[in-house]
Amino acid sequence: MSWHIRGVRSTAPAGRCALIGVQPLPSADELREATRVVEAFRSAHRIPMISARMGLRSCIHTEGLAVVELTQRLKRMPTVVDKLRRLPTMKLSSLQDLGGCRAVFATQAEVARAQQRFMANSRRRNGTEDKVRDYVARPRDSGYRALHLWTRYRGLRIEVQLRTQLQHRWAANVEDLSALTGIDYKSGEGPEEVHAWLRLLSQSYEYAEAGVRPGGRFELELADANAAALSRIVRGAIRQEGNHG
């Protein structure tokens, strides 16, 4: 891969960035160079990311949709470095979500209309189909549900997430819980009791979106899981406070 940004040129397959995660530790100069390459490549996604958000906003307007939320973000540098440390053989060019945008809609039907319009525009622009991951039809083991598209602007890959309000609420719950406890539940860390509750919570939102009322057995299971998760979180917080004391 070769890319150019602000006078920086990298012809290696983003290999120098792997120095961040290697053992033994690289020299200070090597680490500075690796960090410079990562930051430059990350920054190169800013304009493509903005273009993707503007393209998505145009699709929403053309379809006459009422978007609940439309945001964009570059993956934070500490998050990029942490991922490269955890996966030291990963090439920087393999990261699919350095730049991204997200739209939240009221219903899954609106998500589908936005997806269809956006992908049609991408096909005309790039001459190829966007890559799609349908986590609504096939949710992640964690319970995460959303539609992910990977498109290209100016030759760089940008991730587009399309969610319903309830799907977004579930993801926000996970992030809030991680911030509250200091446990990265999004990455699968933490006690199973909490993950079991999150999976059932996701399922309950799926029922709500479909207009289906689950049976009493499911509601009881969800309530029990909620209580077990809350108990586990409180015990963890008390233990952590005791350790700090």
Image (spheres, grey):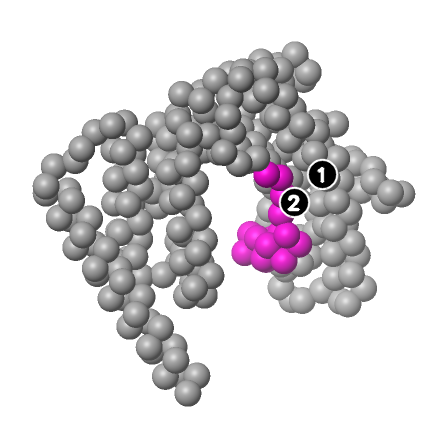
The boundaries of the magenta stretch are 71-88
Direction left: furthest residue = 216
| Label pair 1/2, CB-CB below 8 angstroms | yes
Q: Is mark 1 on a helix, strand or loop?
A: loop
Which of the two discs, 1 and 2, labels the residue nearer the N terminus? 1
Q: Which residue is drawn at 40% across and 21% down?
A: 109
Count residues near mark 1 (Cα–Cα under 10 Å), then give few for <14, some for 14-19, many for 20+.
Answer: many
In the picture, the quarter occupied by the C terminus is bottom left
Amino acid type at circle 1 is His
Which of the numbered marks, if any, corresponds to residue 233? none
The residue furthest right is 7
Q: Which mark is residue 74?
A: 2
| Amino acid type assigned to the residue bearing label 2 in the image | Leu
**Quadrant of residue 123 within the rendered picture:** top right
Nearer to us in this view, 7 or 115? 115
Residue at figure coordinates x 38%, y 41% from the top left: 144
Residue 79, magenta (yes or no)? yes
Q: Is residue 188 left or right of residue 6?
A: left
